[in-house]
Image (tube, rainbow, N blue to C red):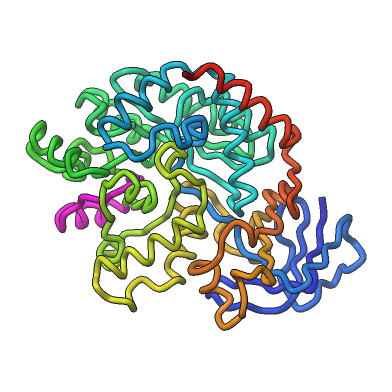
């Protein structure tokens, strides 16, 4: 599919905005310029009417199929939320459930300007199929633990789903320190060395988790992971709320991405990750929503706003963590954390993962600073279009994701009868 966008405003990599055109050919951005030379050589031409073209948001930590638990266990302490609500309901999940609940999440993703998600959940075949059929990008993350996914399964998944489809990828990972034996973690470290591949995990989400790791192993999770060789080839850690100065140093020297989930961490009273401190230490940062059970929205707009405003509160400095930081974390940060190549900005040769924002929405007016409006006042209502790999998946309230949106919604409603 070839597409020309004209009468557009375009967000540049340096966070400036320019008027111009953007042309897509074969899933790749062909040109970003004042006026494309091949004006009549496109199958589809879209008059943006002054709309802003931006790179798609990358949700760098998600449990997509947890849409089935949205508002199921709100306003509960973490232990009760997890053990009395989440785990018992997840035990009832089948591959069919995960397939359809992932598709429901994808509808929310694309209508909110998200073009890729870093997904950690069960039944990877169901997740991969949902992504491929809808046209959405999914990078799946391994979740080795003592109760289900073994290191042997992780190896099988890694080899099967890398090369499975251009929209699908798989990364080595384990669920967390507190759900794994040292033997499991050593096995993942050995796999990482063999593949020369990064490793990802939940880490330091709660104070109890960090304290428990110190009791079990005599050191914090980052120190333990470094000792076990899990991070010899880099990787990423989800949450990173309760990290000390030594932990920050360990993450920096091991090139570990800190993937922050501010809304989920607030809702579960887990705390606030010290993103400003980590960024100052040279740690790269990305943003994710976590699952709908703990957020409950899958909105990168909320994550960006929360990320920057919480850093201002944490540092007692209103000038700390400007809006541009959040946009970088949501665009290029997420792409790099997930290993997505060519998805970081709008430029010739990059992947055509593009979102159009309607700048005439009330929350986007006036245009005193268009870019900062995205972070401080923008929301999903401003998303006019979402394109992935050159294919429009959402436009002006309509979905183009294979199954009709109504079918996906009705199917998920029907499947909810399996959960009491």
Q: Please state the total of marks drawn on the protein image.
A: 0
Q: Is residue 235 magenta?
A: yes
Can the viewer see residue 198 in this picture? Answer: yes
| Vertical order, 274 against 237 (above or below) | below
Q: Is residue 62 left or right of residue 228?
A: right
Q: Residue furthest right?
A: 40
| Vertical order, 197 against 99 (above or below) | below
Q: Residue furthest bottom?
A: 368
Range drawn in magenta: 233-255
Q: Give the residue at x 82% y 67%.
A: 47
Q: Give the residue at x 24% y 55%.
A: 253
Q: Give the residue at x 29% y 66%.
A: 276
From the top left corner, tell me how far across and down residue 316 is, in percent: 24, 73
Q: Is residue 218 magenta?
A: no
In the figure, residue 380 lies in which quadrant? bottom right
In the figure, residue 228 lies in which quadrant? top left
From the top left corner, tell me how far across and down residue 102 is, in percent: 57, 32
In the figure, residue 95 lies in which quadrant? top right
From the top left corner, tell me how far across and down residue 389 is, in percent: 69, 49
| Residue sitting nearer the eye, 282 or 298 | 298
Q: Give the residue at x 40% y 34%.
A: 172
Q: Is residue 359 left or right of residue 127?
A: right
């Amino acid at each position: 599919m070839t597409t020309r966008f004209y009468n557009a405003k375009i967000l540049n990599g340096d966070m400036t905005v320019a008027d111009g055109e953007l042309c897509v050919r074969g899933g790749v951005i062909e040109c970003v310029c004042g006026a494309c030379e091949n004006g009549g050589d496109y199958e589809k031409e879209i008059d943006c009417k002054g709309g802003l073209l931006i790179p798609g948001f990358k949700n760098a930590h998600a449990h997509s199929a947890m849409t089935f638990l949205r508002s199921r266990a709100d306003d509960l302490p973490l232990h009760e939320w997890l053990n009395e609500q989440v785990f018992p309901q997840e035990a009832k999940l089948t591959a069919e459930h995960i397939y359809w609940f992932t598709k429901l999440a994808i509808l929310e993703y694309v209508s909110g300007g998200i073009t890729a998600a870093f997904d950690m959940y069960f039944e990877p075949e169901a997740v991969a199929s949902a992504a491929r059929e809808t046209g959405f990008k999914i990078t799946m993350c391994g979740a080795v633990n003592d109760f289900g996914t073994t290191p042997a399964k992780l190896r099988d998944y890694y080899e099967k789903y890398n090369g499975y489809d251009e929209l699908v990828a798989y990364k080595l990972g384990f669920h967390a320190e507190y759900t794994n034996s040292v033997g499991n973690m050593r096995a993942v470290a050995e796999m990482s060395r063999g593949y020369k591949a990064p490793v990802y995990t939940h880490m330091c989400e709660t104070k109890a988790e960090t304290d428990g790791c110190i009791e079990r192993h005599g050191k914090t999770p980052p120190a333990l992971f470094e000792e076990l060789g899990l991070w010899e080839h880099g990787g990423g850690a989800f949450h990173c709320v309760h990290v000390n100065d030594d932990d920050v140093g360990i993450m920096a020297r091991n090139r570990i991405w800190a993937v922050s989930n501010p809304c989920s961490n607030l809702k579960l009273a887990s705390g606030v990750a010290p993103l400003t401190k980590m960024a100052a230490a040279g740690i790269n940062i990305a943003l994710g929503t976590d699952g709908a059970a703990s957020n409950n929205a899958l909105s990168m707009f909320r994550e960006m706003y929360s990320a920057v405003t919480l850093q201002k509160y944490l540092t007692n400095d209103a000038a700390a963590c400007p809006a541009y930081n959040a946009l970088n974390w949501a665009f290029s940060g997420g792409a790099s954390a997930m290993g997505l190549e060519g998805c970081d900005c709008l430029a010739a040769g990059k992947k055509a993962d593009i979102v159009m924002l309607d700048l005439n929405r009330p929350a986007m007016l006036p245009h005193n600073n268009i870019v900062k409006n995205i972070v401080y006042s923008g929301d999903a209502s401003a998303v006019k279009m979402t394109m992935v790999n050159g294919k429009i998946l959402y436009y002006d309230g309509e979905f183009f994701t294979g199954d009709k949106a109504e079918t996906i919604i009705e199917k998920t409603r029907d499947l909810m009868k399996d959960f009491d």
